Image (cartoon, helix red, strand yellow):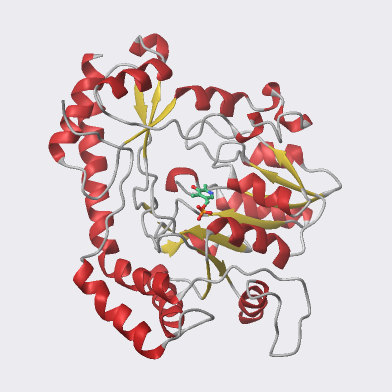
Amino acid sequence: MKEKITVTKPCLPPLEEFVPYLKQIWDNKWLTNNGPFHKQLEKELADYLGVKYISLFSNETLALISALQALDIQGEVITTPFSFVATTHSIWWNKVTPVFADIEPEYLNLDPNKIEAAITEKTRAIMPVHVFGNPCKVDEIQKIAEKYGLKVIYDAAHAFGVEKNGNSILNYGDLSILSFHATKVYSTIEGGAIISHTPEMKHHIDNLKNFGFRGETIVEEPGINAKLNEVQAAYGLLQLKYVDHFIQRRKKITDLYRNLLKDIPGIRFLNDMLAVTHTYSYFPILIDEEKYQLSRDELYEKLKEYNIYSRRYFYPLVSEFSPYRDFPSSKKENLPVAGDTARKVLCLPIFVELEECDIFFICETIKQL
Ligand SMILES: *Cc1c(COP(=O)(O)O)cnc(C)c1O
């Protein structure tokens, strides 16, 4: 039996390259609270991503919660049920009501028409997700936001490095939020960030993640502790040196998958969007049971027998989890495309050190089944 192939596996930098950073931390004894590596990482990431202002966080979930605080969002926020559960949790933690709208079938992001239809008097913001790194229809969403005076907060967990017409996708909306969790394209082990567009907003966010302090003796609002420490910032600096190589590998893997899977009846994958630079965070396929002759769940179970561990992202829908399932917007009739997608989608293994022979093995297994 082959070794277990997991859906993802972190790629750590060479340990000996990390030791000098640790030495520096041990020497200056600055462990957290906006230390030198933290400052350097904010600068290098802003340059790398092509964004103006970035505030590092200890994880994305706290960053999402803080983003809603920073914009003082109340009432209702329209979001997608086809995401990781943290998107909706962040709304709920602010005692704001999440309202689910359906997705579009092509790229599985919030459907602008459905957003507009879900707007009520209480709506204050839209929280879309660039699912699997494919940009949302950002121009249409912006138009809706302007028409109704809403804020737009993008969960950009999957969109590190993604560009549209040469411009970072993180420059759209009021705020964009990144995750640097170990399973993402770029990682600080745990971590996240908020991208903002003015120095005032960055300053506000930086205060919010540090208990609301504005100087030694002034606290102007109830903040939280969501700071990234120096050891993780150092890890992030080192990861940044390798991230282009990581993305190139992911592109190669994606190309090979597409090539090997293109003629299998009932298997669909998402193609690159026009004028978009992708970073290949996931490799989702959609299984049409009638044409493929196995259901998604049957394929998922069978692959396990061959020691291939794919993941059903995103299944169940967030709207199906018990805290949210009784919401009026969670009704199945309101979310037909999301419901259908959640039953069909399967994310195949993709990570930097995934070997070509493993990809051949995975695709051959899918073909034979
Ligand atoms: C990973 C992820 C998150 C949560 O990120 P953490 O850094 O683990 O808190 C939120 N939203 C989406 C879409 C994600 O994939």
Please indicate, yes or no, whether residue 144 appears anywhere in the rendered image: no
Question: What is the quadrant of residue 348 in the picture?
Answer: top left
Q: Is residue 248 above or below residue 305?
A: below
Percent x, y of residue 305: 28, 20
Q: Is residue 221 above or below residue 266?
A: below
Percent x, y of residue 172: 56, 61
Percent x, y of residue 241: 27, 70
Percent x, y of residue 5: 25, 35
Q: Name which residue lies at 76% across and 71% down.
A: 222
Please indicate, yes or no, whether residue 369 appears anywhere in the rendered image: yes
Q: Name which residue lies at 39% across and 77% down.
A: 44
Q: Nearer the viewer, residue 99 or 170?
A: 99
Q: Nearer the viewer, residue 313 or 273?
A: 313
Q: Name which residue lies at 22% across and 28% down.
A: 362
In the displayed structure, does residue 49 sit left or right of residue 216?
left
> Looking at the rendering, in which quadrant would you find the C terminus?
top left
Question: What is the quadrant of residue 186 in the picture?
Answer: bottom left
Q: Is residue 54 above or below residue 341?
A: below
Q: Name which residue lies at 70% across and 60% down.
A: 68
